[in-house]
């Protein structure tokens, strides 16, 4: 598990909006952006969704956060299942959350969903969208799931939380971001001072473009 900072949130927000599944659309007035990199076959994602999913969704519905679900299939064979989840989201975002809740209710439910996805025809374009989302995650340092990106637009900065740190930690971090808590600012400053920082695009990628 790791914590790091992305110091140019504006550079990645466009990609998050392009590739992510936004729950509760509408205006972009919320100052806090929450991106959840998830895998449908991830036990830690399942625990986080069971323990924190309802609160996170309610914050989005209340307009307190701009919420995105971002594909990051880690376990082999889960890519098609992510395509199916995107189809469900396109029809009804609430049904997406309900389906995610069912998948995450038990290992057997996840296995059943993954097995059923194998028989569904998908297009290369749909698969590419899932894999492009995962590629983007890797470009900003994501290595596994769940990974949370908690961005504060007014400060053009994001805290990235790798792994599930527990219900209390996740909820406190999100609440502190919303309330502009000084403790969170101190944590971000400390991470910057010790060099736990990522850039997008990275300096290496920028050099190649130049």
Image: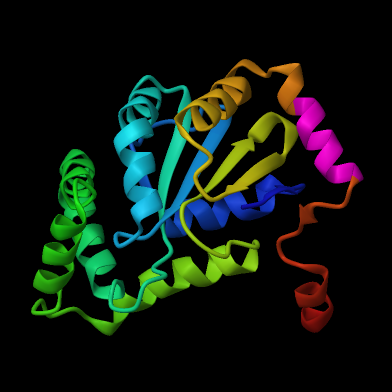
Which of the two residues, 107 or 146, is positioned nearer the viewer here? 107
Q: Position of residue 134 (x, y in %)?
A: 47, 68
| Residue appearing at x 47%, y 22% in the figure | 64
**Magenta: predominant secondary structure element?**
helix
| Residue appearing at x 79%, y 53% in the figure | 197
Q: Position of residue 127 (x, y in %)?
A: 31, 77
Q: In the drawing, does residue 184 fall left or right of residue 81?
A: right
Asked if residue 143 lies in the magenta stretch, the reply is: no
| Residue appearing at x 43%, y 64% in the figure | 72
Q: In the drawing, does residue 71 fall left or right of residue 10?
A: left
Q: Position of residue 10 (x, y in %)?
A: 67, 47
Q: Quadrant of residue 118?
A: bottom left
Above or below, 178 against 78 in this view is above
Chain part drawn in magenta: 185-193
| Residue appearing at x 62%, y 25% in the figure | 177
Above or below, 112 against 177 in this view is below
Q: Position of residue 65 (x, y in %)?
A: 48, 29
């Amino acid at each position: 598990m790791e914590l790091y900072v992305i110091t140019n949130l504006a550079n990645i927000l466009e990609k998050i909006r392009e590739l992510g599944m936004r729950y509760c659309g509408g205006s972009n007035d919320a100052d806090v952006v929450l991106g959840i990199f998830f895998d449908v076959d991830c036990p830690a994602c399942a625990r986080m969704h069971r323990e924190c999913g309802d609160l996170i969704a309610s914050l989005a519905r209340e307009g307190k956060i701009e919420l995105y679900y971002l594909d990051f299939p880690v376990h082999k064979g889960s890519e098609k299942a992510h395509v199916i989840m995107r189809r469900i989201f396109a029809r009804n975002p609430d049904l997406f959350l309900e389906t995610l809740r069912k998948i995450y209710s038990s290992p057997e439910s996840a296995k059943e969903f993954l097995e059923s996805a194998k028989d569904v025809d998908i297009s290369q374009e749909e698969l590419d969208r899932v894999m492009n989302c995962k590629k983007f995650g890797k470009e900003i340092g994501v290595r596994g799931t769940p990974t949370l990106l908690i961005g504060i637009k007014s400060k053009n900065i994001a805290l990235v939380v790798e792994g599930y740190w527990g219900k209390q930690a996740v909820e406190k971090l999100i609440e502190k971001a919303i309330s502009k808590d000084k403790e969170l600012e101190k944590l971000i400053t400390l991470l910057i001072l010790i060099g736990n920082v990522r850039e997008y695009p990275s300096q290496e990628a920028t050099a190649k473009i130049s």
